[in-house]
Amino acid sequence: MTKRADIASMSVEEAKAKIRAGESRCDVAALDKLTEADIQAQAAEDLEERDWDWARASLERPEPKIGIHIKLDADVVAFFKRQGAGYQTRINAALKAYVKHAEKRRA
């Protein structure tokens, strides 16, 4: 999961205030219908929303990337570019997933 700088965490009341002040492009009518309980219920159902055990967390420094020149089929590049910025990172993630899968099969 990628964190974006433009994502903010706030209460329903804070969000409504920002919308009324013209500081958001959110659907005001839909947001006005939500209660804090509705939002909490949606967050509880969200697979990304978990109770993390930070006691077992560790800091892992990523390996430095190596710049190479690679030729890929145009349709492959187009597929990743259609998903927006960060297409090279997604291509790297797809290759990394393939390597992990291939290493598991060999073990």
Image (spheres, grey):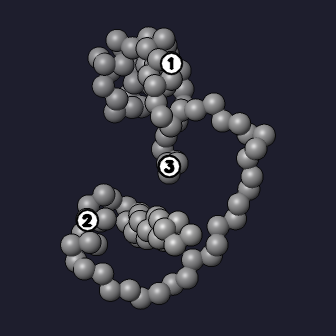
Of label 1 and label 3, which has the lower sequence position? 3
Q: Secondary structure at mark 3?
A: loop
Q: CA distance from mark 1 to mark 3?
A: 21 Å
Estimate the x, y position of residue 56 in percent, counting from the top left. 76, 44
Of label 2 and label 3, which has the lower sequence position? 3
Q: Amino acid at mark 3?
A: Met
- For residue 79, the mark is 2
Q: Which residue is mark 1?
A: 40
Residue in the picture at 62% in, 76% down? 64
Of label 2 and label 1, which has the lower sequence position? 1
* Residue closest to the eye, 72 or 23: 72
Q: Is residue 73 visible?
A: yes
Q: Is residue 15 above or below residue 8?
A: above
Q: Quadrant of the C terminus?
A: bottom right
The answer to whether the residue labelled 2 contacts the one labelled 3, judged by CB atoms less than 8 Å apart, is no
Q: Is residue 73 above or below residue 24?
A: below
Q: Amino acid at mark 1?
A: Gln
Q: Secondary structure at mark 2?
A: helix
Farthest left residue in view: 75
- For residue 1, the mark is 3
Count residues near mark 3 (Cα–Cα under 10 Å), then give few for <14, some for 14-19, many for 20+: few
Name the quadrant containing residue 66: bottom right
Estimate the x, y position of residue 49 in percent, counting from the top left. 53, 32
Farthest right residue in view: 55
The answer to whether the residue labelled 2 contacts the one labelled 1, judged by CB atoms less than 8 Å apart, is no
